[in-house]
Amino acid sequence: MIILETRSLKYTYPDGTAAVQDLNIEIKKGKKVAFVGQNGSGKSTLFLLLNGTLKPAEGEVLFHGVPFKYDSKSLREIRKSIGIVFQNSDDQIFAPTVYQDVAFGPANLGYSKERVDACVHQALEQVGLYRLKDKPPHHLSGGQKKRVAIAGIMAMEPEVIILDEPLSNLDPVGADEIIDLLNEFNQLGSTIIISTHDVDLAYRWSDYVYIMSNSKLIGQGTPAEVFKEQELLKKAGLRQPTTLEIYHEIERRGLARGKNSPKTVPELVSTLKPLDLMWVDVPPGVREGDNLNLGVMYGVYATQSPYEAINATVLHIHSGGRAIVELKRKGIKAGGVLLYDTDKYSLDEVRQIIKEGEIVFVGAMGKKSKTLAEQDGIRLDVTSGVIDKSILMALCGKRCLILTAGGMIDHALKRTREYVDKSGIEFTVGVVNREGGCKWLEEMDTNPETFKV
């Protein structure tokens, strides 16, 4: 279903600068869309056209198939449904307190005081800033200001959220928190549109990509389709995403399998061909044709491997007790990515799960979950790139616990399921405090299939 589109859109600034030229786009409901291009390519102007802040010189913008009208009543409805977060948060934040700033939008929509309070409370809880509701916004950090601006838009309950360079001027942790928020809003049904010149972000995050250059649309498609086109990227002044560049290099060297373009580090790892042959030291008496269990012979190697047992057939014995063996891997070791819903948080339960579940790697996604862990002294091994890093640890036979809440629970399950489906490697996954309490601790060891995706 097309939620937002443009037809032959043109806009020229009063000084004669052509900012958008003959633009035709279609954005589907519920998708994550990235507009990618260098500074000055027209992305910011396009976004102002998409929520009615600017009126096109030619062409039209349509929402749910209905062309924009530019009278005050129509624009009010448009901006209620299509919210925009500017690149510089200081351009958007002006009220004396965080609460008042977030309340400005819903109050202007004519909501009752009770509804305004409910919308503001929910929005600030989602971005993890409710405890700062009475603080002046100009005393906040850059990342906190960005979250206030996002909360101000979310309080109006829009269908579409547009963000101009959402990660600009943020440190890596702050940037990861914003991406977590956008993923959660998307899981709750919002269509998310961003502009960026960061090709790595656009490649790993978006469902669909538009490439802009010199005020024109020069390419579009899925991230895999767009970022493999070297000439298109060169024309736009962009480079290939790092993950894709590494994949193509190992593919050229004959070290990759499959034809899928990996977006994440775990997907990249799954493209690597497993070793077929390797040199090992063998004890006296071993002959060509014998079967060896390297998991028994080489405990350190087996422990660091994603495999529970590595069986091998001796093909050739060299002088000095060295042999070439052919590897035959059987029995993938059962690691796990386990999720804990912090909307139902209990410190004692978390500690029990970590202890009895032999959890060795703990991560937290979302400001609320990170704050709970910090307040209660729960050691966090990772707070950014949590899903990918947990999958990598699970592949090494480790049990991981992710603390998160809301839509991020389903997002993490979906991401893990997609990895399992594409890679063909199964490992334990489940929400440990959804139904049945900690019953999983016993069942996972006796019946791992219960918790496999």
Image: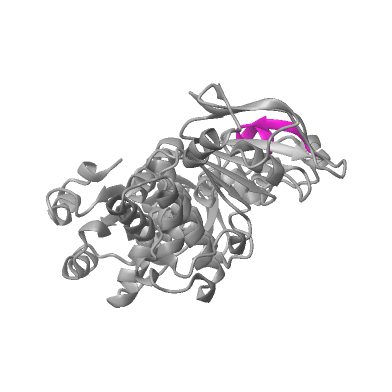
Residue 228 horizontal/vertical position (percent)? 70, 36
Quadrant in the rendering for residue 404: bottom left
In this picture, residue 380 sits left or right of residue 83: left
Location of residue 345 by image quarter: bottom left
One can see residue 305 in this view: no
Residue at 39% x, 71% y is 132
Q: Nearer the viewer, residue 155 or 428?
A: 155
Name the residue: 79% across, 41% down.
236
Residue located 76% across and 48% down the image: 38
Residue plotted at (22% across, 66% down) = 350
Q: Answer left or right for 221 relative to 339.
A: right
Q: Quadrant of the C terminus?
A: top left
The residue lying toward the viewer, choosing from 349 and 338, is: 349
Report the front residue among 23 and 280.
23
Q: Residue furthest right?
A: 16
- Residue 79: x, y in percent? 52, 41
Q: Which residues are magenta?
A: 215-227
Image quadrant in which you'd find residue 26: top right
**Where does the image place residue 444, in percent across and percent down from the top left?**
19, 51
Above-or-below relation of 357 to 214: below
Asked whether residue 221 is drawn in magenta, I would say yes
Query: What scheme was used to colour the molecule?
Result: one colour
Q: Nearer the viewer, residue 254 or 145?
A: 145
Residue 123 painted magenta = no
Q: Position of residue 56 (x, y in %)?
A: 71, 33
